[in-house]
Amino acid sequence: METMLSAPVKLSGNAVNEVKRLMTEPDFVQGQYLRVGVKGGGCSGMSYVLGFDQMEGDDDLFNVDGVDVIMKKAHGIYLMGMEVDYSDGLNARGFVFKNPNATSTCGCGTSFAV
């Protein structure tokens, strides 16, 4: 397993804190990594993937502020320069994706086009 030096995505301080908190929950399965990626679908054509998962053969591994992040090699072109933030405000709570590659997004904030 090889860790790359430069991750295509960034995690805000709030996102790092929330991911690390989730990893201390009693039901967290040890040996999983934070997966960031994309999949086809959603109202704008592509949706973001964010969750804990096992590493697979076509994944790259990055360490982002102490969090091990895995991503399919092919997803980097869609996510280069993206920041994942976490909001816990009254009006919105959850992870927020700020992707400079998105040419359009939908109202839900989890679907985009490139």
Image: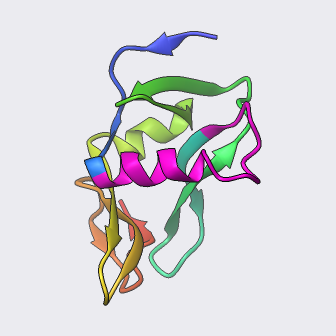
Residue 12 visible:
no
Task: Judge from the rendering whether residue 20 lies leftward or rightward of residue 55; answer left or right.
Answer: left
> Residue 46 at x, y = what percent?
51, 65
Residue 16 figure quarter: top left
Placement of 111 over or under 24, stated as above or below: below
Q: Which residues are magenta?
A: 14-33
Residue most extreme to the left: 100
Q: In the image shown, does 43 or 6 lie closer to the viewer?
A: 6
Q: Which quadrant is the N terminus positioned in?
A: top right
Residue most extreme to the bottom: 91
Q: Residue at x 31, y 54 (%)?
A: 14
Residue 16 lies within the magenta run: yes
Q: Residue at x 30, y 61 (%)?
A: 102
> Residue 108 at x, y = what percent?
41, 83
Residue 112 figure quarter: bottom left
Residue 105 lies within the magenta run: no
Q: How many marks?
A: 0
Q: Which quadrant is the C terminus positioned in?
A: bottom left
